[in-house]
Amino acid sequence: MLKKHTHIEALLADATKEALYEKLIEQLNKDFTLANIEETFPATISPKSLQRELHAIVYQLIQEKFAEYLNLLYIMDVSETKIKALDGSDMVQLSEQVVLLMLKREWQKVWFKNKL
């Protein structure tokens, strides 16, 4: 059963435990490519490094390339309602919350593809 994750670490731990972590990275890379964002993650990246790098990328996109950020959210199919519900007063915290929403959506895609 697909869990409702509230922390990035727990989501990545579940992906690793279910042997779908590499698929999650593949899905991230695929959606980044579709959004014309040149960042890619190696299949061997650790969950902690993935979290750190993804956070830095999202932070930079929000600050410097907002149109690309919105396009990435659209391609990943992250809920607009959930994004709008976030508190945008602290950019670091906001980008971390966005990363959680992105990973949750990507995990959902990967999990369903592999379980159904």
Image (cartoon, rainbow, N blue to C red):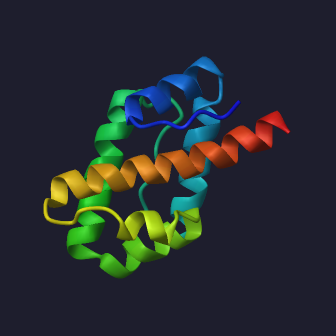
Q: Which residue is drawn at 41% across and 56% down?
A: 39
Is 58 displayed left or right of 72 in the figure?
left
**On the picture, is 62 further left or further right than 83?**
left
For image coordinates 31% across by 56% down, the residue present is 57
Q: Residue furthest right?
A: 116
Quadrant in which the C terminus is drawn: top right
Q: In which quarter of the image is residue 84?
A: bottom left
Q: Nearer the viewer, residue 46 or 1?
A: 1
Query: In the picture shown, does residue 52 fall above or below 10?
Result: below
Whether residue 36 is situated above or below residue 2 in the rendered picture: below
Say if residue 112 shows up in the picture.
Answer: yes
Left or right: where 108 falls relative to 48: right
Q: Is residue 49 left or right of residue 41?
A: left
Residue 86 screen position, x and y as percent: 31, 62
Query: Residue 67: where, in percent of width, then height?
Result: 37, 81
Task: Tell me residue 90's x, y (percent).
Answer: 13, 59
Q: Quadrant of the rendered structure where residue 52 is?
A: top left
x and y percentages locating residue 92 in the rendered image: 17, 54
Which quadrant of the structure image shows residue 14? top right
Residue displayed at 36% across by 56% down: 98
Quarter of the rendering occupied by the N terminus: top right
Res. 37 visible in picture: no
